[in-house]
Image (spheres, grey):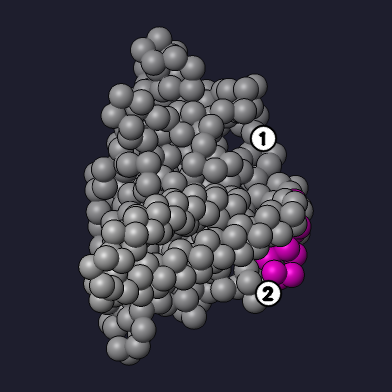
Amino acid sequence: MIDPAVLRDNPELVKRSQEARGESPDTVDDALAADRARRAAITAFEELRAEQNAYGKRVAQAPKDEKAALVAEAKQLSERVKEAQHAVAAAEAASDEALAKIENIVIDGVPAGGEDDFVTLRTHGEPPAFDFEPLDHLALGEKLGAIDMERGTKVSGSRFYFLTGIGARLELALMTLALDRALQAGFIPLIPPTLVRPEVMRGTGFLGQHSAEVYHLEDDDLYLVGTSEVPLAGYHMDEIIDLGAGAKRYAGWSTCYRREAGSYGKDTRGIIRVHQFNKLEMFVYTAPDAAEEEHLRLVGLQEQLLQDLGLSYRVIDVAAGDLGSSAARKYDVEAWVPTQAAYRELTSTSNCTTYQARRLDIRHRPDGAKTQHVATLNGTLATTRWIVALLETHQRADGSVTVPEVLRPYLGGLEVMEPIA
């Protein structure tokens, strides 16, 4: 959630942010009204408690013949105190609900608008040109014995698949390469749980506008994560962490699950939009004043890996209406997919400022001063979808695919993936 002090002191800033996201500024007025009601309820309760304490002293000092009447009045006062306490609880719940409808305040310079209003910051490499009709990643994957959609559908339904043979090896090679890069950059590797409690899913912002994307196990009241950002954000929940030696950086390798609600008819062919995939996610806890620099660092790591894999891409500054509730700024890196003649997202990197940390109560103590909430950032370093761009970009006329040099040590020195007989 946003800082309540900012809401009170600069409501116009919050309104501008909501409007840039395409949300109603009325949510700000509603939250302010709920906050006033909460503080009024707390004041009324505290005044009654003070009156109750003073009355207790009066009862204790009263003559015996007056005590019975005073005790009866004290009971009535006690009931009023209880009612006021319940009113505080209700007002706090209403205030929290109203505040939760306000998304993170976007950083200056983030483009306003929706999904199509992004700004392209830069491009790298030329889209590959072929002197033959290129195959899409699924046709290549089937030739190579790498992807089996038909049996994935048979076993689990639509948008499921098997990675087979070289396909399974390719994903492991890609993920291991990314993990090595993360280790070199000072990230601590984690294999997190992929089922989390509601408070963790809610704290990261995935039970708001993205709730339809999330798988829920009702009997256990647990959620399957769509990214290891979620358990990594919960890793230091309710803690005061030490940032004296710098940011805490983690790399989480996990299987991820998404319902892909609302995507009927979109990307039904192949493994671009699926229900289950693997991903290596970078996650950082840092001081708020270092968050923007850290954000650029994460993007730099992603770009370097894509360059080393020989992929053409662009970096976009995502518009406010497409950020999701927690991000204050998000950069996507989109690789060129030849058969679609389009850039498709491979990585997403978000600066969530203190929004998630406030919900999850993650703080640090700068130089022994009063504790303050940390900033959190996340970014993909490798995922199953990258196979799409790799196969299509490096294909050859006979259906074989050149292995990028950087991946060859992870595939036993293999230079070319050949079609199976």
Q: To which residue does mark 1 refer?
A: 340
Which quarter of the picture shows residue 406? bottom left
- Say which element carries label 1: helix
Q: Residue at x 31, y 66 (%)?
A: 66
Q: Which mark is residue 130?
A: none
* Nearer to me, 201 or 64: 64
Main structural element of the magenta stretch: helix, strand or loop?
helix
Q: Is residue 111 left or right of residue 38?
A: right
- Say which element carries label 2: loop
Above or below 410: residue 290: below
* Nearer to me, 337 or 344: 344
Which quarter of the picture shows residue 20? bottom right
Q: Which residues are magenta?
A: 11-22
Q: Is residue 347 left or right of residue 421?
A: right
Magenta region includes residue 352: no
The local crowd at label 2, few if under 14, some if 14 to 19, many if 20 or more residues have their Cα within 10 Å, is few
The quadrant of the rendering that contains the C terminus is top left
* Nearer to me, 115 or 385: 115
Q: Residue at x 26, y 47 (%)?
A: 192
Label 1 is placed on what type of residue?
A: Gln
Q: Label 2, label 1: how many angstroms apart (C-alpha)?
A: 45 Å
Q: Which mark is residue 10?
A: 2
Percent position of residue 284, x then y: 38, 65
* Nearer to me, 406 or 347: 347
Kindly report which numbered mark, 2 or 1, lies closer to the viewer in this rendering: 2
Q: Residue at x 40, y 54 (%)?
A: 76
Q: Residue at x 75, y 57 (%)?
A: 25
Label 2 is placed on what type of residue?
A: Asn
Give the total of numbered labels: 2
Q: Is residue 319 visible?
A: no
Percent position of residue 326, x then y: 53, 56
Percent position of residue 3, x then y: 54, 69
